[in-house]
Amino acid sequence: MTTAVTDTHVQRAISELQAVITERYPTATFDVTAGEDEPTAIHLRTTVDLDDPDEVLDLVIDRVLAFQVEQGIPVHVIPLRTPKRLAQLLKQTSAQQTPAALIGVDVQ
């Protein structure tokens, strides 16, 4: 579900974060949603073709914190793997572990 952002300060924050991310990861895609547990929070879901999507958060975390703390803008960057990367990871993981281990079930 994409959320329409009408506040100009929030729009600028989202645009700035998208620009920084796109400069480093040109194929990144974005989806803006409201937080499920906290509807006033704005989630910038960022899909990137990386083994470790947290690299995206490492890139922008200082700016995200500045938006949150200094400007009171409740924006959060949620880095996600592409479906292809996720499928590869699941395939690798399932080849190395039993199905019970994948979901954290103790089968003793």
Image: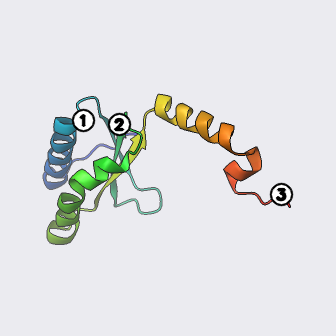
In the image, what residue occupies the spot 14% across and 46% down? 16
- Label 1 vs 3, first from the N-terminus: 1
Badge 2 crowding class, 10 Å Cα cut-off, few under 14, some 14 to 19, many 20 or more, is: many
Read off the residue under disc 2: 48
Residue 63 in the image: state x and y as whole percent: 17, 59
In the image, what residue occupies the spot 16% across and 44% down? 20
- Label 2 vs 1, first from the N-terminus: 1
The residue positioned farthest toward the bottom in the image shown:
69
Question: CB under 8 Å between callouts 2 and 1?
Answer: yes
Q: Amino acid at mark 2?
A: Val
Which scheme is used to colour this image of the protein?
Answer: rainbow
Read off the residue under disc 1: 25
Callout in the foreground (2, 3) = 3
Question: CB under 8 Å between callouts 1 and 3?
Answer: no
Asked whether, in this view, residue 14 is left or right of residue 54, the answer is left
Asked whether, in this view, residue 47 is left or right of residue 88, the answer is left
| SS assignment at label 1 | loop
Whether 9 is drawn above or below 69: the answer is above
Callout in the foreground (1, 3) = 3
Residue 70 in the image: state x and y as whole percent: 14, 70
Whether 65 is drawn above or below 18: the answer is below
Badge 3 crowding class, 10 Å Cα cut-off, few under 14, some 14 to 19, many 20 or more, is: few
Q: CA distance from mark 1 to mark 3?
A: 41 Å
Question: CB under 8 Å between callouts 2 and 3?
Answer: no
Q: Nearer the viewer, residue 71 or 39?
A: 71
Q: CA distance from mark 2 to mark 3?
A: 35 Å
Read off the residue under disc 3: 107
Q: Amino acid at mark 3?
A: Val
In the image, what residue occupies the spot 43% across and 33% down? 82
